[in-house]
Amino acid sequence: MQTRADPPRVVVIGGGFGGLSAARALRKVRAHVTLVDRRNYHVFQPLLYQVATAGLSPGDIASPIRWVLRRQPRLKVLLGEVRSVDTSARLVQLADGEPLAYDYLIVAAGAIDSYFGHDEWRRVAPGLKTLEDGLEIRRRVLLAFERAERAADAETQRRLLTFVVIGGGPTGVELAGALAEIARHTLAHEYRSVNTRAARIVLLEGGPDVLAAFPAPLRAAAARDLARLGVEVRTGVLVTHVGAGLVEAGAERFEAGTVLWAAGVAASPLGRTLGAPVDRTGRVLVRPGLSIPDHPEVFVIGDLAAFVTARRDDGRPVLLPGVAQVAMQEAVHAVRTIERAMAGKPSEPFRYRDYGNLATIGRASAIADFGWLRLTGWPAWVAWLFIHIMKLTGFRNRVLVLVQWAWAYFTYQRSVRLITGTAASRDVMGD
Amino acid sequence: MQTRADPPRVVVIGGGFGGLSAARALRKVRAHVTLVDRRNYHVFQPLLYQVATAGLSPGDIASPIRWVLRRQPRLKVLLGEVRSVDTSARLVQLADGEPLAYDYLIVAAGAIDSYFGHDEWRRVAPGLKTLEDGLEIRRRVLLAFERAERAADAETQRRLLTFVVIGGGPTGVELAGALAEIARHTLAHEYRSVNTRAARIVLLEGGPDVLAAFPAPLRAAAARDLARLGVEVRTGVLVTHVGAGLVEAGAERFEAGTVLWAAGVAASPLGRTLGAPVDRTGRVLVRPGLSIPDHPEVFVIGDLAAFVTARRDDGRPVLLPGVAQVAMQEAVHAVRTIERAMAGKPSEPFRYRDYGNLATIGRASAIADFGWLRLTGWPAWVAWLFIHIMKLTGFRNRVLVLVQWAWAYFTYQRSVRLITGTAASRDVMGD
């Protein structure tokens, strides 16, 4: 394969951080590259919670994949849904249309929400993985306040103004913090029959701490900031039932008009079609060079890959976290390995460089762990803001997000408070 | 009623230009005001076509009604769907919940698309009245290019890259012009298998001219600009059939992947529940003071009202057009009449002041008719741009739209090119 005269065909599955970084890194490689995604756009996931909480528009954090890669004339972007990979025939099977043949394959299909075997919870408690998820959460949150305004009795109002967020990772904390700000500030003067400031926001975490990936002093700072915002944080709480208007965690019951899910992820089902070993959540156990066993031409990167960095005392593996920087560094390594293979050189093991970890709680409140430097409060928030603006795809998006954040900072407003989507559109659009 | 000690209850139905202007004008009136709309936001309709053509986000042209009216503490905003009005009992019936009692009523429920008795055309050819309509059109237009890129044969590509816009009013012209710009400029370098520049955009108009409301020299300028953009304009063409992928107009057939409807409006069905006479399209025939016969306390304004200004030679009435400035002036007149009634004074006839008429065709291309001044090309476009920015609701929206227009002007980009919605979300969201 490496000695053919024709440039090799490289297929990249997925237009997230991993896939897009791979496509960009391939720009200097003499190869026919095809990137396939079922969406025509890349989403800047770290700001998805701002779409869900009416701070930004979907268009502000998403960029058309074609546009991002427009300067790579030999790269082809395909809108299509990948069903499976036939690693022995080296074919990517699409839901519709001809299969794609490849010489090298980079699979970056990402993760989906996991309800730990309780898929019936999904309807009640939407997760936050896609733009549509974000718009659905926005719709539910805003509708809860509208319904409370129209509710006849205090009991119903109380239930409608109770929001339960399940999962105390960065997404759960961001959602809970933003909900508290919406209730206490943004909407405080706009309702007549209901006091939005009295809204109850509960954050449930199964482990002993929220933001468990951070060191103890930073976790403590985050907990203080959440308390200051009036978020009830319950740790060590395992959810046993999620039903319409009700969350049960053992003996505890929460009557909540809105329940959001930020508790678990599972790998894309595509991983199981590769014929490689997967872990309990479906992540593909990759080799040190990010390829899969017996197929040095197939790489799995990002949230779909289980890359073991160490073993715990009990033998359980320590994996790289499912964050953008891991996916992006893995993408570059996979492309470099393809280049080496084309030159007849062997694969090298992947090594992750951790540049730091940030999480935001709310206005002027965040935590940042750069290893050599730890920040909380305002300085951490400024670091968070600066880094996110810089990493956002496209100059236009950066300007738009900056304008809106400045506006939000000075006015406490979240201006994309539109209740759009399913229920309403069915009426209007006649289907 | 006018002599009661309690302030009267005024109900406003609709949060469009008419309803919102009425609510604002009521701020100085000693009355309990309730505005009810089935959406929680006001849409700046003149820029809806930019949402449909990926130039702006829904959030850029919409504002939460509550936020717009937040400084009126005695005004209540209600999210609800009005089913009918019982003018004898003075009650507004909601689809869910208690009816609203009123002493004065302002009905500004607006218009919907009309398919001239062919409601089966709606599925094939969506109209452009709501944000959801705009997103649906955006989805179809962008998907057509994606499908063309994946199409196997030239015949299919040609069909997928044919866009038919039915209706040569301002909306039809704006859509056709924007589609031409998308195909010839925005997407020109991003596809590999298909030449988007070869796309065919057809604008069908039943009457003898597009933009018939404008004087002949301006119509001619608009026709020239459309031709320059490569839009095929067909006038005097009556559509006889709209089916999947096919539009028939008499003997002419257009095989088109995408068909858009901008041909006709009908009044909101709410008008027929008032018990007042309506015209053929369901508009309520209002009295000279904008109230309905026998009910001086009920006003109908905006697109729902048929206000006769004159009669043609054949006896047919000349009506005020369905534009924002008519609705807004009528709103102010209705509120003034309520104030006069509260002071025991009689109603006065409404008089419309026409400040001018604008339509845009594309980049640096528009026509403007201010009566004393007619503009075409670049000057008209600058006037159009300036007026629309000024009239947009909210300072934030103005800044965001300006940033995006500047970006679009210099790059030819339309950055909200996201294929979101129904088809895709069903997969992802698990319902």
Image: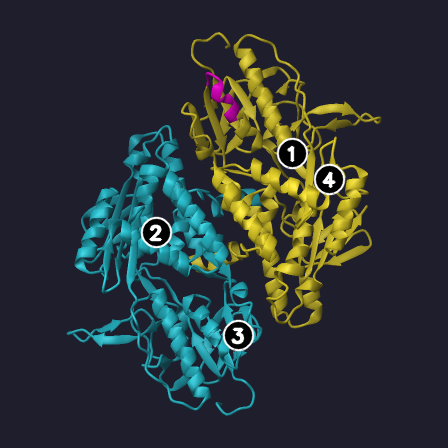
Chain colours: A cyan, B yellow
Q: Which residue is mark 3?
A: A34
Q: Secondary structure at mark 1?
A: loop
Which residue was labeled with disc 4?
Answer: B375
Q: Is A366 situated above or below B170?
A: below
* Mark-to-mark CA distance, 3 and 4: 48 Å
Q: Quadrant of residue B293?
A: top right
- Say which amino acid is labelled 3: Thr
Would residue B30 be counted in the magenta stretch? Answer: yes
Residue A284 place in picture, x, y as percent: 34, 75
Closest to the camera, between mark 2 and mark 1, is 1
A55 falls in the magenta region: no
Check chain identity for marks 3 and 4: say if they share one: no
Secondary structure of the residue carrying numbered label 2: loop
The residue beneath circle 1 is B323
Task: Give the mark toward the camera: 3 or 2.
Answer: 3
Viewer-side residue, B19 vs A255? B19
Q: CA distance from mark 2 to mark 1?
A: 42 Å
Q: Which residue is mark 2?
A: A125
Q: Marks 4 and 1: which is nearer the front?
A: 4
- Which residue occupies the foreground of this view, B280 or B313? B313
Cα gap from disc 4 to disc 1, whole angstroms:
20 Å
What residue is shown at x 37% (from left), y 81% (from top)? A291
Looking at the image, do the residues carrying marks 3 and 4 touch, with CB atoms under 8 Å apart? no
Q: Amino acid at mark 4?
A: Leu
Instruction: Please tell me how crowded label 3 is: few (under 14), some (14-19), or many (20+) other residues with Cα within 10 Å.
Output: many
Image marks 4 and 2: residues in contact by CB distance under 8 Å: no
Callout 4: helix, strand or loop? Answer: strand
- Span colored in magenta: B23-31
Q: Is residue A312 left or right of residue A363?
A: left
Coordinates of residue B324 in the picture (x, y in percent): 62, 33
The quadrant where residue A388 appears: bottom left
